[in-house]
Each structure stands twice: as C-alpha cells, then as structure tokens.
Amino acid sequence: MREITLEHLPWLAEGAAVLGAGGGGSTYLSRLVLHRLLQQGARVRIADAEELGEEDLGPVLGGMGAPTVGIERLPTAGRFGLLIKTLAEATGSSAAFIAIGEIGGGNALTPLIGAAESGLPVVDADPMGRAFPELQMNTYMIDGLLPDPLLLEDAKQVTAVLRHLPDAQTAERYARALTWAMGGSAGLILSTVTGAQVRRHGIPGTLSLAEKLGRAMIGARGAHRSTVEGIAEVVAGARHLFEGKIVDLERRTFAGFARGVITIEGLGSYRGETLKIDFQNEYLIARRGDQPEDVLLTVPDLLVLLEQESGLALGSEALRYGLRLHVLGLPAARELKTDNALAVVGPSAFGYDVPFLPLPGDLLGRSAPKPPSVTAQ
C-alpha cells in the first residue's frame, strides 16, 4: 500500500474535477477537510484491488445531492467515519477497506476522508470512471449487485439505513427523496462490496488516473502551457471540441439535481458558431444545432469544461455568464461502452434520441477487449 500525503492533494483535487465531467461536487471543501486531517496526523492508505482478500468487505462511500447545495453547506466533521461505524452496527460485519463510489469531483476525495477518520485503506478503483447523477449508473449495479444496505446521513448526523432494496432504480428513488428531505445533500454508503467484486466489476486505477491528470495539469501550468495539453498527455483520446464564452445559462436545483443548459458563443477558430450543453449535475450532451448530426458528444464519454485563464475544470455549480472556456471530450472507460452499460448510462437513459458515437480509445489507455457498442439499447 502507498500513502496519500499533503503533496498529493492538489493533484488529486484537480484531476478529480476533470473526471467529474461537471458533477461529483466541488473538490475545494473536501480538499480542505482532508488537508486538516492529514495535518493532524491521520493516515490515508491506498490499496490496489489485487491486494484485497476475496471476502474482504468494503462500503461504497460517497455523497448524494445537488452540487449547488454541496458548496453552500460546510462538511460535518466525522461524518464518514460515523457512517462506517453505523454500517458495522447495522450489519454486524466489520469493513476491511473503503470503496470509492465515484471518482469524479468531491466524491473522489470523500472516501479518503472516510479513510482518515476510520483508519481503513481505500481501494484504487471505482464503478464509474467519472461522475454520474443517479445511483444505478455504476458498473456494480449494472452488473447486478444490489444496493444493500444503503445508508444516508445528514448534516446533523441523522442516519437512515435502507435494507432489502430490490434494485438500484428503487434505491435511487428512495435515496433521492430522503436526500432532498435532508436538505439536498447527504453522506452516502451505496452498498458493500467484496474484494472479489471490486476486481470483477470495478474500474481499476481510477484514483491513480485522477492523480496523474492533476499532476500533468499543474505541471503544464507551471511550464506556461495550457492544461489542455496536460490532459492530452495522460488521456490519449482527449479531443478539443470547442472554445468560447458563456452567453446564456439556465440552471435550477430541483429534486436533488442541478439541471440546466449552457449556451457558449464561439471564439478563435470557432467564432460565429454556438455550442449548447445540457447538464443534470454532470454535462450530458454537446451540440451545435437541433439535428442529430449536430451532436458532438454524449454520455458516457466525458465532457470537460476548462476555464481558459486558470485552466481549471469547472463543475456545473461554478458556471456563470461571461466565462471563457475550452470544451474537451474524453473517451469513457471501456466498461461503460457495453450494450448493458449503455442502456443505463448512454444518451437514451437521459431521454435523448441520438446514437452514442464513442470517442476512440479508453479513458485509462487500455486496449478494448472487443469493439465498443455504438448505439444505446
């Protein structure tokens, strides 16, 4: 196992913001909490999936709610350590590790906070390879694992334990209503997984990927180069889609989601063109017009918006009129491009009647075991 130190935090935060694809919550507050815990002597250990025992149990840890709410409510000290303790009381089983629920945004750092508060190691894998807005949108649930037990905790440490949920869609419906009742933001244990299940159904190496992305971006900035170049050095399939200024922004927080549409007016070589991006916490689809052939990119591939001056990846909660942006596309992890996965995370799952035309390659640079699917079922 290796350890996370204060030196790693800027890299992890910046890379996780890229993988959030607009969602997962801001990394700023989570980074501050983690910084304080490490300064106080807490340890955060990272394990490869291969280091876990077959029957070792780990909670799938993260947060649930609208990113716009998450930046207004300060984190509660000890929240994730208490969640892990409550899980042990509810199940009678002790956790051996912590699993990352989603590697995007602040949710990538949440399990590290849980590790600092509990002493458990975090496994270097997650079931999304990015962030998604709904609970069923992960490879554990897509492959048939059940969200049992599911725990939610609010800022006052009121904890709900849900058992015997029949499927992930039901879990999403119940958990979303509870999160909204808890003020729009809650700590989450989605389920428990074994070491064998992480290896079989998870996406390996995604925490390391976040660190590599952040290190490359900060290195590029230090060398007076664009962070676009830094990202392209790590993800070979990265593609520059657009450059422009936000001229219109529709955003509302409703039922636990931040939903809206961004209109970007082209600059530079894109002058005279307009790009629209829909989001539901995460950026879902980018298009230059209303026809199917005008679509540039859809989920599950990642849409990344970089603020031109700072080079930082922006979540949907940070957008505002007048910001100048680079828009990038990154290929999704190969686990999200199967027919079964596309039925849950492809454009049709969000109500778009357009085909999924994947960017070439794999987010983690692996060779695909078979040609990716090109249409959602």
Image (cartoon, rainbow, N blue to C red):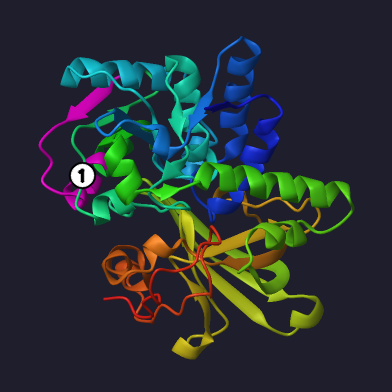
* Residue 169 percent across, percent down from the top left: 20, 52
Q: Is residue 51 magenta?
A: no
Q: Which residues are magenta?
A: 157-175
Nearer-the-camera pick, 266 or 150: 150
* Mark 1 crowd level (few <14, some 14–19, many ≥20, 10 Å Cα): many
Indicate the quadrant where residue 344 lies: bottom left
Residue furthest to the top: 40
> Could you tell me how many numbered marks the image carries?
1
Indicate the quadrant where residue 16 lies: top right
* Residue 320 percent across, percent down from the top left: 65, 55
* Residue 118 percent across, percent down from the top left: 42, 16
In this image, 208 relative to 243: left or right?
Answer: left
Nearer-the-camera pick, 49 or 235: 49
The secondary element bearing badge 1 is classed as: helix
Residue at figure coordinates x 61%, y 17% from the top left: 38
In this image, 318 relative to 125: left or right?
Answer: right
